[in-house]
Amino acid sequence: MHAAILVFPGSNCDRDLKVAFEAAGAAEGVKVSMIWHKDQELPDGVDIVAVPGGFSFGDYLRCGAIAANSPVSEALRKHVARGGYALGICNGFQVLTETGLLPGALRRNADQKFTCKTVALDVATQNSVFTSEYSVGQRINTPIANHDGNYFVDADTLAQLRAEDRIAFTYVDNPNGSVGDIAGVLSANRRVLGMMPHPERAADAALGGTDGVAMFRALSGLAAGVMATA
């Protein structure tokens, strides 16, 4: 499996993602490439593009808005259009909504405060490669660190997400005001996941938890030959 991690000025979780992918996929020979925001193409054979957390371009305008217009984001759109997988975490989730690859928007937290703590999530669906090694209703603990993590969609879109089983994770105790307690959502083809919590920060017991390992272990099994039929 070949993962490409996008790096923007202000990204600060890119190396965490690299370590999580490599640790989970050691036996499968996972390859990870770091891709600078000015690059116009992705390497050949990329299976999944990961957009990391941080503060891309200092969160000017709207969080993720400038990053969504970087040259590499056009390559991301093309990757997804041809059936590739993508994962956006925290600021990466914001980028995915700004590119239009996922519905909705991330607004300022309801309490107007930056929130940094470990929260409990419930797995809402097993029907995606990202959540395939979890069970529906399984409770996991994952860190969050955001100021604009308040996910919003209108009532019709929320109903559609629920009807199509596209809500991946929900908060047990909503920390930011997200509509429907949503912590992560999937694209219509289930190949794109955006989530505010940080599974890459829950992938090493020495750092406090391993509940994120299952996601990276599942993703390490992706291969270009499988993607066409997955």
Image: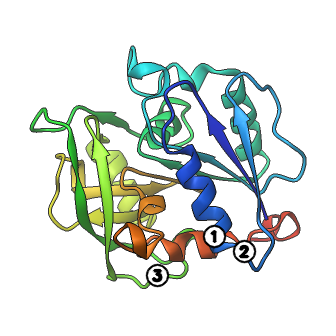
Identify residue for label 3: 134
Separation (CA) of disc 1 from disc 2: 5 Å
Tag 2: amino acid: Ala
> On the image, which quarter does residue 184 sit in?
bottom left
Q: Dot 2: what SS? A: loop
Label located before the other in sequence (3 or 1): 1
Frontmost residue, 153 versus 197: 197
Disc 1 residue type (three-letter): Ala
Q: Amino acid at mark 3?
A: Tyr
Residue labelled with disc 2: 26
What quarter of the picture does the C terminus occupy? bottom right
Mark toward the start of the polypeptide (3 vs 2): 2
Residue under the image location 48 percent in, 38 percent down: 12
Q: Are marks 1 and 2 in contact (CB under 8 Å)?
A: yes
Is 115 left or right of 21, judged from the image as shown? left
Question: In front: mark 3 or mark 2?
Answer: 2
Query: Against 147, is 190 above or below?
Result: below
Bin the neighbour count of mark 2 within 10 Å (Cα to Cα): few under 14, some 14-19, many 20 and up.
few
Q: Report x, y in % for residue 54.
A: 44, 36
Q: Going by the picture, which residue comes out furthest to the top?
A: 61
Residue depicted at 48% across the width and 22% down the height: 65
SS class, disc 1: helix
> Measured from the top left, where is residue 131 in percent x and y?
51, 73
Q: Nearer the viewer, residue 39 or 79?
A: 39
Provide the residue designation for mark 1.
Answer: 23
From the viewer's perspective, tell me whether residue 225 is left or right of residue 23: right
